[in-house]
Image (cartoon, rainbow, N blue to C red):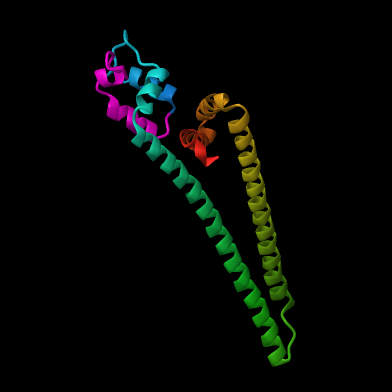
Amino acid sequence: MSKTKVSKIVKYEVEEDVINMRKAGLTYEQIAEDLNSGGKIPPEDPINKDTVARFLEKIPEVKRKLYRDSQKRVIKTINQSFDIIYEINNLYEKTKNLLEQMERDAEEKGKYINPYQFKAVSSEMREFLSKMIEIQREINDYKNVNKFMEIILQTLYEEVPDKIPIIIERLRTIKETKWFSDILEHREEDKNDW
């Protein structure tokens, strides 16, 4: 927004709408389409995605909020994964304790363990171990992908920094990678993070 020209977003008083739509995760193009079809913008003077982008770039608190929100989403996902790991580990320990208790009871009473109960409990233990191994592989894969991405991004920032905005925009257009574009955009602002 320059001093001589007022943004259409300000002109038609849809600033709050734009900010709320962006916080909700809409792309610049989706915001422009919603505004144009919502009746607040005259059809002869439509808003495009560039107008939305320029307006939002002037509002640093929106950028910070979007970055914080994307960080919170990642942390929430990681926490949920750790909760699952904790629960599986907890169930494994309970199953292991149950199996050990069955063995102690059989030893103390001088009887054999019921083979059906033993098999059921040991099958559960194998299932829990299998899940734990699978989760560990996924964690290792995540760590490897994360390290790979750090190396790629570091190299991009060093070798072709002028291409970073293009990458950010392409990531932003895909819903599944939009959060990643927000993180990159934040790092683009704070170039010393790399």
Farthest residue in the bottom direction? 109
Quadrant of residue 111 within the rendered picture: bottom right
The residues colored magenta run: 1-26
Residue drawn at the location 69% of the way across and 70% of the way down: 120
Q: Is residue 81 left or right of residue 119?
A: left
Q: Nearer the viewer, residue 27 or 143?
A: 143
Q: Nearer the viewer, residue 140 or 116?
A: 140
Total marks in image:
0
Residue drawn at the location 36% of the way across and 33% of the way down: 60
For the N terminus, give its image quadrant: top left
Q: Is residue 91 left or right of residue 67?
A: right
Quadrant of residue 115 within the rendered picture: bottom right
- x, y percentage for residue 23? 38, 35
- x, y percentage for residue 33? 39, 20
For the C terminus, give its image quadrant: top right
- In the image, residue 89 sits, relative to residue 159, either above or below, namely below
- x, y percentage for residue 118? 71, 75
Residue drawn at the location 42% of the way across and 34% of the way down: 25
- In the image, residue 102 sits, relative to residue 135, either above or below, namely below
- In the image, residue 105 sits, relative to residue 35, either above or below, namely below
Magenta-span inclusion, residue 20: yes
- x, y percentage for residue 18? 33, 27
Magenta-span inclusion, residue 110: no
Farthest residue in the top direction? 44
Quadrant of residue 153 within the rendered picture: top right
Q: Nearer the viewer, residue 48 or 126?
A: 48
- In the image, residue 16 sits, relative to residue 90, either above or below, namely above
Q: Is residue 72 left or right of residue 140?
A: left
Residue drawn at the location 63% of the way across and 47% of the way down: 142
